[in-house]
Amino acid sequence: MEITFKPSSLNYIYTGSQLSDQQVRIFYNLSDILENPHYRINVFYNQLENDWLKLIDNYNEEINEEINPGYLMNFTPRLNISPELPDGSYNAAISVVIGNKRTTGEFEIVNWGEMIVYLTVSAGHINFTVTPNVGFLHLQKNNSINPILKLSTEASSQIVLNGSNLLIANKNALPLYFSNSQEIEISTSSAARNLDFGIYSTNLNFKNSLNSLVGNVDVTLLVTNDNKLEVIADDLNWSIQIGLTTPSWKDIIVYDPDNNVEIFRPDWIEIVLVSTQNNVKFFTVRANESNLTSGKYNGEIKFISGSETKVLNVSFAISGAWDDSYQKIYHFTKDNELLKINRSSTDDSYVSIVELEMMITTYSMKGEKKTFNRVQEINFKDNVATFDVGKYIHRLIKTYTDGLNTRYVDVNKSTGIHPQYRFTEVYFNVKEMNFKDLTTIRSFVIPTQYYIYGRNPFTYLPKNKLMNDENDKFLTMQPFSTNLISKKGCFAFNFVQTEKSNLTLKQNGKFIQIPKFGNVPQSVNINIFGGVIYIKDIENVKVGDLFTLTYNGIEKNFIVIPDVENSMNIFYTNQWGLLDVLEFRGGFSNNANYTDVNSQSFENWTEIKNKLSTSKIQKLTLSTGKILEETQNVINEIRHSNKCWINHPKIGVIEMHAISSKLTLQDSEEYDIAMDVEFELKNQNDDQSIQF
């Protein structure tokens, strides 16, 4: 046992007042530095009474008893004494173990240590029990005999019983004082006979001589007039708008002394039996809009038991609105989601249309704000009007013609994470109008919806991966993919964050700190972030290393391969308008084509040519080198990108766009693939060509 503690033990005396905390320091006696240190700390109680001690870390949070990474340097024992802990002497052992956690998951213990905490309780705490801790009384007001609930108690000192004035104990008004074991009869007082028919909740509480609560009994009191069928119910009238509200569950309580009640209801009424207690049945009921159209529905619920019948009237009003399954944290513009608006009436004597007014606010990568106010008229088909809002928004966002901007440049300069752009916001004002005279039948507002340019990345999930579509997520068309990268390369990542989410990096299966990464930067109203990690910023990288970047369960994998002399990191904007990157390692060719514009004239029967101007087009052809088959999707995305560039160490940022690509190598035995991509460089200056 080589772990020691300072202090080596603790001794507490508790008399009812809160005791101050005392921090414990841990000292390890290790001969070697642990490869993958993990610790576990546990409390072992030396008597039946437990849970009177908590272990707290430096962040004032309770330490769990699981295997945790790192070294635990100090902790704080904190007393957690409840009134149920009797006076007496107690002790507990705090055990700490330290060791290595293997990649197989096995925990190899290297050192351990133990300290004792002593506790003396002298606070007037007693042993007390009461059974049952819930009770039921049925008072029939036309019956002179009061109902009785019997309680059994055990106590080591004096107890006082108190509670509602609706109850009495041992035929006397409360409070009741007693000690030792007691059989107590609880009944109803004269005040209870003044209650109306119904269900009432009451409570009995037990306290010790220090006025500390040591027990309680919840009592349900049913009050009826006779020993016949009785029904108590909430107001059973519902009114909803389809897509905006749903019918709520309501309570029905049935007292059936014969215990054979039958229930008859309309098809659109749901009734569920929740529980039964002493011939009392507790039901929950609601209207169900399934298979119903807009309109007003009325009906009855009948309860029949023997010769007794009780009837409850029910009604259900449905008015059409929009389908609230469209409500999400955010949408993607290319997901073909349809906003559905339900017609308010099935009356075919008139034709109605929808006027959908959209107040749209979009933000470019530069942070530029554009607002649009658009109105669409939509026809109903089978009483439903549909509109693809995302497709409409997608066309508007494409009107931006961003060049390279500060956010792109900041992201690709070095390792780091940066805010990108805000969601597009759409506020909807909906009118249903009579087509004949354009009078408004009804109008309502749909809550603001948020949109991201592009397709939901879950579209590309492998079939064996199932994830909650509402999760914050990587914006990548290669979830769970693997790419090849050299030490000169880097990998980009983009993600949506609406809540605090977990971004982690592993090297060969072990968690490592993301270089130059603290918390995800916060920016008002921005929930889309982008980042780049350069391999050169990670320590101790070797050829063959596997890096796994994980965000909310989605992985991107990168295998390190040997460096080549002419590798280039090609940055591009993906379908979400965000930066991504691919390292080209197969060499390049660079050429410039010149085109002259000439004029011709004739003088004295002689042809004269004049050069008016010369234009230059420079093209750069890059080879990917060996890539994995799934990386072909990246080449396809580069081909579709309207912004690509190189951050050249000598020349700076060179903007270009892909104009062609072709498969140059495919080996069926080795599964080797290589592709050439031809780029046209942005013409900065006709007087010179760019040399790489």
Image (tube, grey):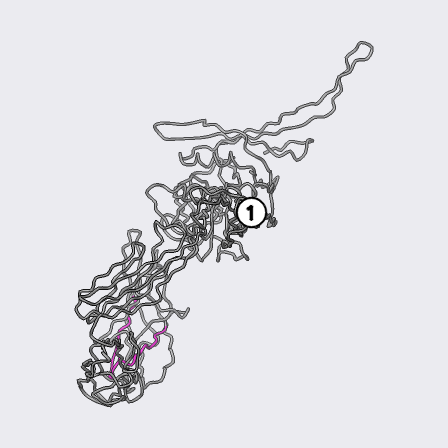
Tell which of 99 and 216 is nearer to you.
Answer: 216
Q: Which residue, as the protein is rendered here, is positioned at the far right?
A: 604
| Start-end of magenta stretch | 76-96
Q: Position of residue 405 (x, y in %)?
A: 60, 45
Q: Amino acid at mark 1?
A: Leu
Callout 1: helix, strand or loop? loop
Q: Look at the image and tell me in which quarter the N terminus lies.
A: bottom left
- Residue drawn at 32 percent across, 58 percent down: 299
Q: Position of residue 3 (x, y in %)?
A: 31, 68
Q: Is residue 544 above or below residue 57?
A: above
Residue holding disc 1: 438
Q: Is residue 559 above or below residue 40?
A: above
Task: Determine if residue 336 is in view.
Answer: yes
Question: Is residue 517 on the magenta stretch?
Answer: no
- Residue drawn at 63 percent across, 28 percent down: 617
Q: Look at the image and tell me in which quarter the C terminus lies.
A: top right
